[in-house]
Amino acid sequence: MSQTENVIFAVVLAIAVAAFLQSAWRLVSFIRLGKPDGRLSGELVRRFWTMLVYAFWQRRVRKEPYGWNHFFLFWGFIILFLANGEFVIAGLFPSLTFELLGERIYGVLLFLFDVVSMIVLVNVAIAFFRRLVLKPAHIEYNSRDGYLILSLIGALMLAFFCLYGSEFASGTMSVAGVMPFTETIFAPLMGSLFGSAAPIAARVFWWLHGLIVLSFLNYLPYSKHMHILTAIPNCYARSFEYPATVPREEFKPGAQFGVSVVDEFSWKDLLDFTACTECGRCNQNCPATSTGKPLNPRLLVHDGKVNLLTNGPKLLQGNRSANLLPLIGTTDEHEGTVGEDALWACTTCGACMTNCPVFIEHVPKIIKMRRHLVENEARFPHELSVFFESVEQRSNPWGITPGDRAKWARDLSVPLMSDAKCDTLFFVGCAGAFDARNKKVATAVVRALKAAGVEFAILGTEEKCCGDSVRRLGNEYLFERMAKANVELFKKYDVRRIITYCPHCYTTLKHDYRQFGMETQVVHHSEFLHELLETGRLKLDGNKPAVDGKVLYHDSCYLGRYNGLYEEPREVVQRVTGRAPLEMDRRLEKSFCCGAGGGRMWMEEEPEHRINANRVREALGKDADVIAVACPYCMTMFDDGIKDERAEGRVKVMDIAELVAARLPG
Amino acid sequence: MTTRKTLNHVVVAVKQVPDTTQVKVDPATGTLIREGVPFIMNPFDTHAVEEALRLKDRFGCLVTAVTMGPPNAAATLRKCLALGVDDVVLVSDRVFGGADTLATSYVLSEVIRRVEKEQGRVDLVICGKQTIDGDTAQVGPGIAVRLNYCLLTLVDRILDISGAERTITVRRKLEGRREVVRALMPACLTLVREVNEPRYPKVPNRLMAETAEIPVWDNQFLQLSLSRVGLKGSPTHVKKIFAPERARGEILGDAENDPEGAVALLIRRLIEKDLISVGR
Ligand SMILES: Cc1cc2nc3c(=O)[nH]c(=O)nc-3n(C[C@H](O)[C@H](O)[C@H](O)COP(=O)(O)OP(=O)(O)OC[C@H]3O[C@@H](n4cnc5c(N)ncnc54)[C@H](O)[C@@H]3O)c2cc1C
Ligand code: SF4
Ligand code: SF4
């Protein structure tokens, strides 16, 4: 390498590195536009560990087909980082190479680089094959970005092989027999192609290699491949609170609520936008996307990113008013703008978040944008007006007189908290108190608790809607009222333990109410019944037959994904029926929502796009006699879906508490 | 005082009422148990407020909400402010208590005169058709007569407002038919619930309303003759309040477990009693 070449390279390198640093800094300043988020304080070791497991060991990435493919590319990159480091340094100071480490180590390194480069090349080929031939529906297989980056990686590997091949062909290598692919394929190839001009070819490939590396570096911050830079910190900053609960809002006069401009998100939300790998796992599992709704969580994240990159420069100058690309729009058509109809389509089922390899938190973003629509603009699907008013005035979604809340328990002689001195509360929830079908479930829970000799009481007419739907719909103002009123009641009666049979009450009381100073223990009836059966406190009548026929279990989103309760309800079914329940195809983390979460229970859904119909069809395909659920919303959605599918005679829906109650003595 | 062209000022009369669906009759005394029953804005009046706000959205007019009631009726006025009403007046004084419709409409009409004096020309007074507690539907007409406004009752749509001719055209919902009427402004409207779908309050407005000062007009301020207000000004005397006796009804079928069966039974009974007829 001539000295002029060194100098030219030094200049090119300096320009490339400066350009990269500038765009990386630009990205960092965009992310710093976000609001504070207190998550990073403490838990350093745990965060670091998470980063190793998920970013480097790629635990979630490898859960899916082609995850290994990515794993090899990623690690290939890390190893070749060494090779490229040497390459750059040697470009400046030709004598500083790995050769200095001695022939042995040098040989080992060359061997490693050779094999890894081939692995990377093969994986690039596989990726091309997947995009060009298999064309999976959930990824944007013809994204220009994707092809460009794959081509760059492929070209880099080829340049590497050709460079070393030419070196071998020119006889300038100090070692031999260490680079199997280079020496057997590329050295002879270069020799026969370039003959005595091989040393010149080596220089050309050297420069080609160098330019590709530097272009790659500078292309990164402008493509979806910026995730190489951002996904690692994103895993480090993941939420350990699962689900990632939306933060409270401060209701002071003059404030604005939710998010309507991208810089009103937290910095973590903005980092999320930049960390998306566009793998499409979120939309693949999304019930809204799957049923043809205008919501696609991957595109939502993409729109957030485009919005940030477009508005970032203006926002950095403090220009928050004029000419910003709107974040929320009435239609979904503009890139960088999220459609209102998309925001309203989300069931907050969490399938996107649980399956995202880099811990992007979609639901809190959706709720924050809903907050803007509901709280600042009072703009939402009209049927929600009645719903909000009902919760506000009658403290239940149906708008039924609060005085009737305890009617379901009239003949059950359940003590009221106001009469009994008792530290266990059965928080019935609105469905159990007001919905005809679900009242029977509440009754079954009471029967089981009594049979096990559990002392408990209910709040009766004092209980208020927990506010789950209200919060997910973005009406934080109203939610705060419900939360404060209920927490106050729990304090007043000095409640020590709360049992609920509704996963939505459960999640809200257990996670959301923490933000309102509640520390009471909350248990779901699936956990509780499981424990009662396990410890023998609850005895089943050996002479009573188990429920007729085969039982299929459906995972409720707010029980499974939100709280990790997958095993307990299944074991309850197993104990009551004597065998493990049948399983859906989409189950556990990939369970398919019933369609009622996130306030969707109270909204219209076009008949041809119904989520519950999709799920009911899956269930009917399993030929079960009973669909077992552990959630009142799932109960309603299945019941309705079965009617719509005209399958009433074929299968019935039962709560796990009813399965238990059917086998109680007496 | 600037006067807006087409429409200058709309006054809405709202009343705070007990949520009557939650009121129970004391079986011993036969009177209403009002304790612990939440108060709400008279549901008809929520539509009156909405219609006034729609006029504000269209014409930029000023909207004032007035109510006569006890001090806690301020809550209903806060709700009006949260919805976007510009101004509110709480008419409250012990001497106004026990008013019947005659005294109520007298006081309200005087209040509207006063509002007009302070805030400029009133073009429309909008009331609900009736309340869910008093149920008389007389207050709106009472106000119109006293102020000598055109009276348009049972309005289910405002069709047109002409600033030049100072007229308003509305559709009235009568039994079995609709009637389109044009009248001179100022006019007093009473609305049926079909007229619109009330909006939902925005949180910034709600927060502002939570702490807003609610102006209270008492008789010190209004200086009305004591013989025309409150109990003294009310010729109506309540002799007795009772829940009417009625024969025990019958619960048809088991709607909870067999809704189809219950509906079939109900239809059969209705046909038998000739209350509905089957199409040809
Ligand atoms: C037999 C009888 C006994 C009663 N006893 C009592 C009693 O003991 N204590 C008591 O407090 N009341 C009592 N009232 C109620 C009181 O007389 C009426 O509520 C009042 O005069 C208004 O009449 P209304 O409710 O029928 O209103 P309507 O005429 O049905 O109301 C029509 C519209 O007028 C407006 N409006 C009505 N009232 C007001 C108001 N106060 N402020 C602003 N706008 C208003 C609203 O827009 C409403 O939609 C009694 C009424 C009757 C008929
Ligand atoms: S929470 Fe569920 S419905 Fe909402 S975007 Fe994620 S996967 Fe889709
Ligand atoms: S948000 Fe997550 S799951 Fe969805 S495409 Fe991006 S990286 Fe994949």
Image (tube, grey):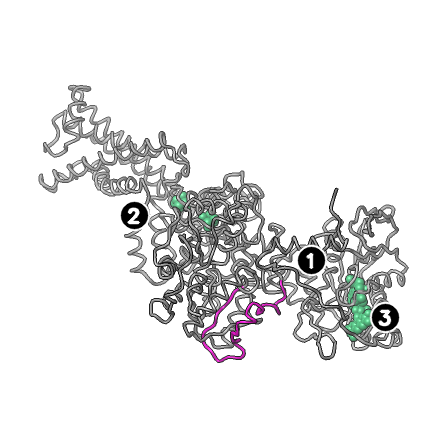
Q: Residues within 10 Å of mark 2 (few under 14, many from 20)?
A: some
Q: Residue at x 38, y 48 (%)?
A: A356
Could you tell me which secondary element the residue under label 3 belongs to?
Answer: helix
Residue position for label 2: A58
Mark 3: C-beta under 8 Å from nearest atom of ligand 1: yes
Could you tell me which secondary element the residue under label 1 belongs to?
Answer: loop
Ligand 3, image quadrant it occupies: top left
Which amino acid type is marked by label 2?
A: Gln
Q: Residue at x 78, y 51 (%)?
A: B156
Q: Position of residue A160 (x, y in %)?
A: 22, 32
> Dividing the image into 4 quarters, which one contains the N terminus of chain A?
top left
Closer to viewer: mark 1 or mark 3: 3
Numbered tag placed on residue B103 in the rendering: 3
Q: Is residue A503 visible?
A: yes
Q: Position of residue A135 (x, y in %)?
A: 38, 33
Marked residue chain, label 1 = B
